[in-house]
Amino acid sequence: MIHDCLGHCPPLMNRDYAELLTLIGKAVSTTQKGEQVLALKRFSWFSIEFGLIDEAGETRVFGAGILSSTGEIPYSLFSPEVTRRPFETDVVIRTDYDPSRMQNQLFIAPSFPFLRRELEGLVRRFGIPVL
């Protein structure tokens, strides 16, 4: 409950974030192909759950998995053990993660509209009829 209330609810006030979350849900529920589901799962993990975003030249947290963890917040932003890279969809959807530990690989998106456009492009590329 803390994860949802602290992590997901506040960003839902941002229209692009809300539409991104909705589109991911529709896409996953529409496709039957395992590799597409895995790609969408990874996209979601490194954005909705463990996403970082650039805001006025500073890296900020927006992923619910980070926002709902007092340990994950400073770790994601300041730990030298974390690799932070620009959000590139093709890299993200090929990147594995381990949900049982602190995340040491994160991606920084330039904006919510960027993430939405990237997801829309991915969904079109997969031929998933949800747009």
Image (cartoon, grey):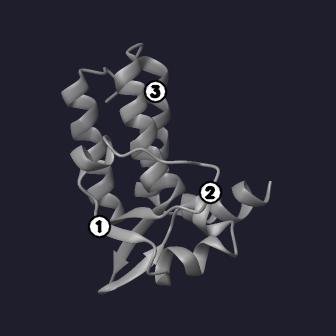
- Residue 33 placement, left or right of 7: left
Q: Which mark is residue 85?
A: 1
Kind of residue at badge 3: Val
Mark sitting earlier along the chain (1/3): 3
Q: In the picture shown, does residue 30 fall above or below 105?
A: above
- Residue 7 placement, left or right of 80: right
Numbered disc in front, either 1 or 3? 1
Q: Which residue is label 2 attached to? A: 101
Q: Work out whether residue 100 or residue 5 is closer to the camera in this orientation and state it.
A: 100
Give the residue furthest to the front: 81
Q: In the picture shown, does residue 53 fall above or below 64?
A: below
Q: Which mark is residue 57?
A: none
* Picture quadrant of residue 43: top left
| Cα–Cα span, label 2 and label 1 | 19 Å
- Badge 2 marks a residue whose secondary structure is loop
Kind of residue at badge 1: Arg
Q: Which mark is residue 28?
A: 3
Q: Give the residue displayed 49% in from the left and 53% down from the top.
A: 48
The x, y position of residue 77, in whole percent, is 48, 80
| Cα–Cα span, label 2 and label 3 | 25 Å
Q: Give the residue displayed 35% in from the left and 23% down from the top.
A: 35
- Badge 1 marks a residue whose secondary structure is strand
Give the residue furthest to the right: 1
Q: Give the residue displayed 46% in from the left and 27% down from the top.
A: 28
Mark sitting earlier along the chain (2/3): 3
Disc 2: CA contacts within 10 A as few (<14), some (14-19) or many (>=20): few
| Cα–Cα span, label 1 and label 3 | 25 Å
The x, y position of residue 45, in whole percent, is 48, 48
Mark sitting earlier along the chain (2/1): 1
